[in-house]
Image (cartoon, rainbow, N blue to C red):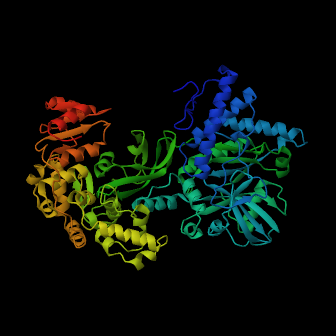
Amino acid sequence: MTANAPTRNPYLEEPPTEFDPVEELDADAAREQARQLREAIRHHDHRYYVENDPVIGDRTYDALFSRLQDLEDNFDLDREGSPTQRVGGEPLDELASVEHVAPMQSIDQGGEVQDVREFDDRVARGLADPGFDPDDRTYFCEPKFDGLSVEVVYEDGVYQRAATRGDGEVGEDVTENVRTIPSVPERLRGEYPDFLAVRGEVYIPTEAFQAYNRERIERGDDPFANPRNAAAGTLRQLDPSVTAERPLSVFFFGVLDSSVDFPTNSEVYERLPEWGLRTTELAEAVDSIEDAIGYRDRLLERRDDLPFEIDGVVFKLNDRDACDALGSTARAPRWAFAYKFPARTEQTTLRDVVVQVGRTGRLTPVALMDPVEVGGVTVSRASLHNPAEIERLGVAIGDEVRVQRAGDVIPEVAAVVESNSEGTVDFPETCPVCDSPVERDGPLAFCTGGLACPAQLERAIVHYASRDGLDIEGLGEERVQQLLDAGLVEELADLYELGQLDLTSLEGWGMQSVANLQDELEASREPPLDDFLAALNVPSVGDATATALAREFGTFEAVMGADREGLQAVEDVGPKVAEEIRDFFESERNCEAIERLLEHVDPQAYEVEGSDELDGLTFVFTGTLEGYTRSEAQELVEAHGGSATSSVSGNTDYLVVGDDPGQRKREDAEENDVEVVDEDEFASVLEERGIEN
């Protein structure tokens, strides 16, 4: 790193939340830390508000934000352009921008009871100056919904438009999407005001969220991290019909502007339902801040039983004239405060288990849970790995479980903390996708449907057409899914029966793209045997093993008919791999799919091209070579009659070592007395046998 290179920002990924006391910093260190925090907070704002994909938990974000405020306060730093002076993120480019009728501000917040009492003290001091009696202050309490804030405008009782909060001044126009939400009336009821702009929170109920995530997992999509992300992603759909299919709901909780006055915030809650606007029954007026704290504690106890996610409560001064007198800072009203709940850290409730079918047919149980913060990241699903792990844990729906990050990457259920039901999760005996029998292999479970299983078919087609398969351009994941959704492809062979009219009827397919795909498919009808074997995605058969099988047996029919002993005679094929290959070709449904495919595809018999100067020699390559890629070196060896394998054994003659070689292969070479050569020595071996390098 050069002397002028910027330091890595520690607050972008897995940020620390323990800071040195502000008093121990000098001015330069404070300015640099504030710069990094502003950069990080803008990054996390974008991930949260724009991409709907946060990478840190709320409490971690709050700690970063609070630290920035402390630095700005204690060192009198310039706040212009700081995240502490504005709200949220920028509107999305894909949606039109809308200016709000009144600012949609954020709310100051804290997670400690002392924060709440300090807020109450500030309110009391602020009310004394404009002539209000501080002793008469009362509060209105409401849940802090974990959804997406929207402004909804009515004129003469008719729904006009809706917008997201955006940056607080300008939001995204989501009028047509919000119109699809059943709890948003097209017309107001009763004696409504001539003009009304209300603030609401769009959310997805917990049960509906879990059901929706189950559907996403079963079709191979990534689930949403939490209901808030699901609501935000749904509301920002460009196609309102997609929004209409998803279970959005809304609570209204504030008036931004109106042609009528509301003396108190509690009256807002009384009047809105009269006009058909939904409010929560959990809101409550209280006489003091201590009563408000008691309200919060009672709601915290009910949190897990509520049908929607809340992450705290909001206290508002009830008298709206007093609210106007207190006014606002640049980013938040002085008359409101959010008392945040503690994050659900590592312990949560298991709500459902869905079984995911992988490309190889392996069935993986996935736990769907109430969102929980694990290692600074909010997660709502975790792996249960396999049926044996379910039995070991003794886990069942409704249990309180502890979640941890496996290898700091994949969340997993680590233990049952409190059992709330009898028995364990019933693992299916048939594939949840194709209904084929499920077979157990030790602790694992597999669908026997093979190429005939739709869950495996999508991935099988993508692999078949990939560079690791037959390299058929124009058949990426999106287009394969399009073909499956349209019912045009139900097995691999159907690719070769696609007609021009079939394809041009699909969105995004023009005559040229159809012609290109048909040319690619035509060119793949006579593939090399090793490419065809790799394209079928036989378990444990990658490029090297496919080539070894092709060289050993010569024809596809011979590979299909090879017994376990014959397969084990092939380099790099041990007993387990041989059994997997036999199981694949002995599957009745796989055989049916392959038989249909062979009506269109004729894999060519394998012929060793080139000379035999290296006949009888086996090479293994490790590390990075300068003269060619590892695959090019392997092809060179094979073109001259030698073998190139991926692992060192007693049959290996040379281990060719490049830069950054694998230690395991060097140890295996020493153990098996295999000669180790560098790239120059490898070139000498070739030269000695008359091979020009």
Q: Is 456 or 598 nearer to us in this picture?
A: 598
> Which sits in the foreground, 79 or 664?
664
Q: Residue 55 in the image: x percent, y percent?
A: 53, 44
Residue 521, horizontal then vertical, whole percent: 33, 68
**Residue nearest the observer in this picture, 614 or 56:** 614
In this figure, what is the number of numbered marks? 0
> Residue 134 at x, y = what percent?
84, 40
Residue at the spot x=53%, y=51% of the render? 304
Q: Quadrant of residue 135?
A: top right
Asked whether, in this view, residue 587 is left or right of residue 45, the answer is: left
- Give the image location of residue 216, x and y in percent: 45, 60
Q: Image check: 480 left or right of 45? A: left
Specify whether 544 is left or right of 499. left
Instruction: Establish if 124 lies above or below 460.
Output: above
* Residue 635 is at least partly visible in this image: yes
Tell me if residue 490 comes above or below residue 550 in the rendering: below
Q: Taking the image as drawn, is residue 485 in sight? A: no
